[in-house]
Image (cartoon, helix red, strand yellow):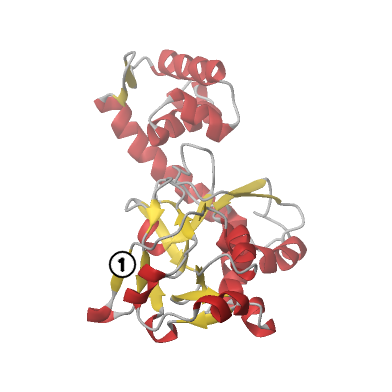
Amino acid sequence: MSVFDRIELPDLRVFLTITRTGSFKGAAIQLGLTPSAVSHAMRRLEERLGAKLLNRSSRALAPTDTGRALALRLEEGFDKIGLALAELDAPGAGRYGELRINVFADAAHLLINPAIPEFATLCPEVRLTVVVEDRPIDIVAEGYDAGIRYGHYVPEDMISVPLSGPQRWVVAAAPSYLAQRGAPLHPDDLAGHTCLQLLLGDNSSYKWELGRGRSRCRVRVPGAITINDTATSIAAAKAGVGLGYFLERRIGGELEEGSLRLVLDDHAAKGEPFHMYYSSRRHNHPALRTLVNIIRVQQGLAKLR
């Protein structure tokens, strides 16, 4: 009996996931197993191979030289399996299981919401789970197949695909606020206005970026109200509470109906495109390319080949 005949593929996948996430807990979350099941699978694998694959301590976990070499070869093997399944032409083949993605709120509103109806039609057997949150996360450690963030927020070790063109960031206010306080004509004028503070997912306060090229500047604006949710910020701005800083596309409806008006339009900043990203160390879910292409076409970009 060969070594391969004594090994179960799920145990190899557990081992590979541990090396990717760097922990038994992370592997358990990603695979939907209990930590004890992950630990048992590793013991079984090492016993059947007759080799130690992981060095464990109370503070750290790292593959041995043998484990590292095995992980590299397994990466190649599982990637080939994933590609083979993704390229099957049979109706519905490769479009199965659950696709889990993590996106921030504006991306959910602008990209995911319009794409869901077509995705549901093309991939009826896929359980699509969309988790909306703005905090920075490790998508692999937390068990996601992919995430959506702005390009400059994508970790360097990830593969990323643009989903849109550059985004325009603008300052806007309600007519009632402008009638009472007037409109700022230059970024320096913001010091004399009430502004809605923008709280990032890591709980840091965001400086408004205005202008472009050499005139681009980051302004710390005054204001007693801080909000980390775009919908709430839009509502506050429409109520005349203060000036708000938004993606122009996010307030397109409000600008069209007149409940918000642009100010400092000549100083609007061009921001990074939205990107879908996923780990370079794992094959992507076959339905992920379908979702990416739906979004890209809706955003006026070409399909991926």
Looking at the image, which is closer to me, 202 or 20?
202
Name the residue carrying label 1.
Answer: 218
Q: Quadrant of residue 74?
A: top left
Identified at 45% across, 14% down, the residue is 43
Identified at 40% across, 72% down, the residue is 271
Q: Tell me, yes or no, if residue 124 can be seen here.
A: yes
Looking at the image, which is closer to me, 168 or 191?
191
Q: Is residue 281 left or right of residue 237?
A: left
Is disc 1 surrounded by few (<14), some (14 to 19) or many (20+) residues within 10 Å? few
**In the rendered structure, which amino acid carries the disc numbered 1?**
Arg
Looking at the image, which is closer to me, 163 or 24?
163
Q: Is residue 259 left or right of residue 163?
A: right
Q: Residue furthest bottom?
A: 266
Element on which disc 1 rests? strand
Identified at 46% across, 41% down, the residue is 140
Identified at 72% across, 58% down, the residue is 92
Q: Quadrant of residue 233?
A: bottom right
Position of residue 250 measured from the top left corner of the image (x, y, whole percent): 58, 71
Q: Tell me, yes or no, if residue 290 can be seen here.
A: no
Decide: is 239 above or below 60.
below
